[in-house]
Image: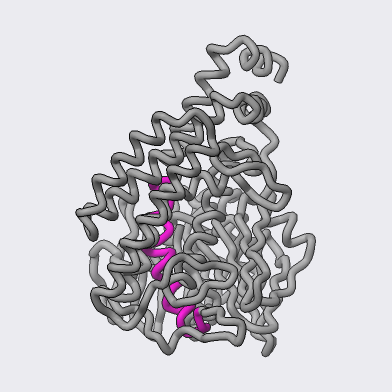
Amino acid sequence: MLFASAGLRPARLVVLAYDIGCPRRARGIRRVLDSLHHAKQYSVFEAMLGDAECRGVLAEISACCDFSSDLLAVWWPLDGLRLRWLQGRLTIDARAGEPCREPAALRPNIGNFMSGNLALVVDHAGATLEMGSHDTVVLVHADGRRERVGLRALGSVVLHGDVKLSTGLLQAIAAHGVALTALPVRGRTPAVGFSCMPHRHVALRHAQHLAFADPQRRLELARRAVWAKLEAMAEFARRHAPAGESDLYRAMQAAAAVSDVAALMGVEGAATVKHFAALEALYLRGGPFRFNGRSRQPPRDEPNALMSLAYTLAQGQATQLALHAGLDVQIGFLHALHRDRESLSLDLIEPARAELDDWVHGLLTDRGLLKPAMFSHCDDGAVRLTKEGRGLFYPAWYREGFRIARRPMRRLLAAMLDSLRSCLHSDPAFASAELSA
């Protein structure tokens, strides 16, 4: 996933040209570029594009190309930089107006636009998201400026505060598998996610429901989540508080001996208290920030504010992973059923929490990316990241944080899927569910 924040940089002149022998692919690119309304020749276009809009257009175009035979060139005349896709890789064709041949080394938060998987963060008061032509999302700023990103280029959308959007856009985003997360600017309103429910893998979801209803199978799957979390906390302790590492391994042994989920959660809760005590001591070693124990809704200090934001974004990832696997995100194994909770998503982020805590500590102390002035203190005691701070946090998240969260979530999800699929083939009740589906 790549990061694209609408309006990240002022719009600049971009020239795009293509040479495609296949009429069908050429028509597809032409439909994308026609909406720019700046054709200079049949296959040459120029436009004033911001960073997000430019990357979205490029990702849309690349989805239409066959780079074994098609040619695509992108030129920034004012910067003297031209990119081309040559011999299976993105290459700088000219620098400062002079021809050259070297691999394109783009900034980490831009990445390779050929991947076609961007994240759009909208953090502008009075902004509106609309459906545009040719499956595009149009961001309309309060001052009337318009930017566009292709739906095929998007992997996720994050909205801060009051952003207007239509039901048609919600339907299109869900149909394209784009995760949408709406975050409140202030107050205790929880974050809200929108995702398309899975339509396939009915037998797998039925096996998930039956596993939840069976106390022993549920305990086995919940234990996997707790073991993964305890292992991650032990790794955190190994790096920062070696004296507490053995306690976490003893907790793993205790988790193996419990007979029900309630006792398992007691073991996990006691270990988490020790982890947060180690985290508090870590912040006391240096830096301008202090962690005063875990607090949420609202967070009471700067580390908690960032941790809550990171957990929320990670939960959106977990939801997409579970849905793409065909599972029901409302049915978890460690977390109980609740009408307003995606319990399976919460299960999946458990092993990622300790790694994200370490990453947040690095942002605040080791790297000093965020300063105390980038946090606001509300009358109710809540601490919030300011818009300036969010402008620094989101590039770091989509450059590093989401990958840190995704690895342990994928491992846990794979283990859960293996267990559920083995039940499908070994247990007559599950096998009959598979046949009937």
For this view, does 100 lie left or right of residue 296? Answer: left
Is residue 321 shown above or below 203? below
Is residue 90 shown above or below 338? below
Residue 193 in percent (x, y) is at 65, 58
Q: Is residue 417 among what the camera can see?
A: no
> Which residue is at the front of the view, 293 or 20?
293
Residue visible at 69% across and 47% down?
338
Task: Assign the C terminus to one quadrant of the image.
Answer: top right
| Secondary structure mostly seen in the magenta stretch | helix
Residue visible at 35% across and 79% down?
289
Residue visible at 26% across and 52% down?
244
Quarter holding residue 168: bottom right
For this view, does 111 lie left or right of residue 237? Answer: right
Find the magenta span and give its range: 385-408
Is residue 13 shown above or below 410? below
> Which residue is at the front of the view, 43 or 173?
173
Residue 376 in percent (x, y) is at 51, 86
